[in-house]
Image (tube, helix red, strand yellow):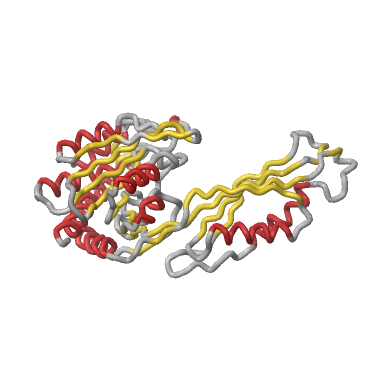
Amino acid sequence: MPVVELCKELIARPSVTPDEAGCHDLISQRLQKAGFTIESLPFKSEQSPQVENLWARRGKAEPLVVFAGHSDVVPTGPESDWTSPPFEPTVRDGHLYGRGATDMKSGVAASIIAAERFIEEHPNHPGSIGFLITSDEEGPSINGTKKVIDELTRRGEKIDYCIIGEASSEKQLGDQIRVGRRGSLHGKLIIKGKQGHIAYPVPGQNPIQNGLLALDQLAKTVWDKGNEYFPPTTFQISNIHAGTGALNVVPGAMEVRFNFRFSTALTVDELQLRVRQILNEHPIKYDLSWDVSGHPFLTKQGKLINVAKEAIQAVVGISPALSTGGGTSDGRFIAPTGAEVIELGPQIGTAHQIDEAVNIEELRKLPEIYQRILAQLLHSS
């Protein structure tokens, strides 16, 4: 199966963020043969090392249908824990194993095969097809898709429809389409106290004891009830650090890292204000800083979702649910341009895990779904 062989070639390249490890050359060669104009768009900044991005386009007319994705993968963890080496693609028990098999080299491979087949059948197709591939999705996401979208906007290239091949299915291929994502807001809280001997504590100056009640209130707060498309906002503490390492010292400060995954029912400003209001109810001194890694987005209900539903029904015979679950994705950079954006890919079950794998039969069907979507979007335009 061509899609399996291409996926194997991608997995064999150890493209841990931000190294694309030759994936982009392989993708470029395939797309160039299919008539795409290839453009390398590297970006770097003080906050992040240089990131290689690939932009490919075939055609100049509207509408522009783009397959977006990433070539980078997360680290493997201890390779000795893998049944087979993570960068040696291995087939067993009807699955293809390797780092990136699920997230998201299978989606990239399937979209390339779909485009090649569509172009072979329709060499003079209307509209345009594009590919936006970054090597920074699993990392800081500073110099990847966001910068490419900024450049395309500057040049006046507008994406009409975008399919992201991220793993989106739960129990079988196509049972779910992601039509949006929650926002992600990180907080760094420093609760101040006064260091001293534990046998002679200064009253009210233990930052741990003073801060726990405030953290408990934050953890128990109902921030919103969500809405039609989003679950309620969640607050989770990821790290707490305090102490000098000695057992007889009251620490001078406690550092707390926390995260909100929030819906369109709240704004960043509203969350930040409510956190400060809660902290101010407690007798603590603190510093608080924020980092927004993604705003929530919900794609407009339009042609792309309907076409994707029809394609899934035709290929796998099920009606997909629409979801905004999961973490963040690069769709958060594309949707604000006005493009209709969906995420549609294989089962997410083993993403980022030891022995990551994709079901081969489902991988075989994924290009057919993508090809049907292309045909409907371009030939009915």
Identify which residue, 355 or 289, lies in the foreground.
Answer: 289
Q: Position of residue 55 (x, y in %)?
A: 28, 40
The image quarter containing residue 379 is: bottom left
Any part of residue 83 in sight = no
User: Foreground residue, 58 or 359?
Assistant: 58
Tell me: residue 82, above or below residue 377: above
Which quadrant is the N terminus positioned in? Answer: top left
> From where the camera sits, is residue 178 visible?
yes
Looking at the image, the residue that sits furthest to the right is 200
Q: Residue shown at 35%/46% (left/top)?
A: 149
Quarter of the figure with residue 4: top left
In the rendered image, residue 124, in percent from the top left (x then y), is placed at 9, 49
| Count of all numbered marks drawn on residues in the image | 0
Residue at 35%, 49% in the rendered image: 166
> Compared to 143, does 312 lie above or below?
below
Residue 43 lies, in percent from the top left, at 39, 35
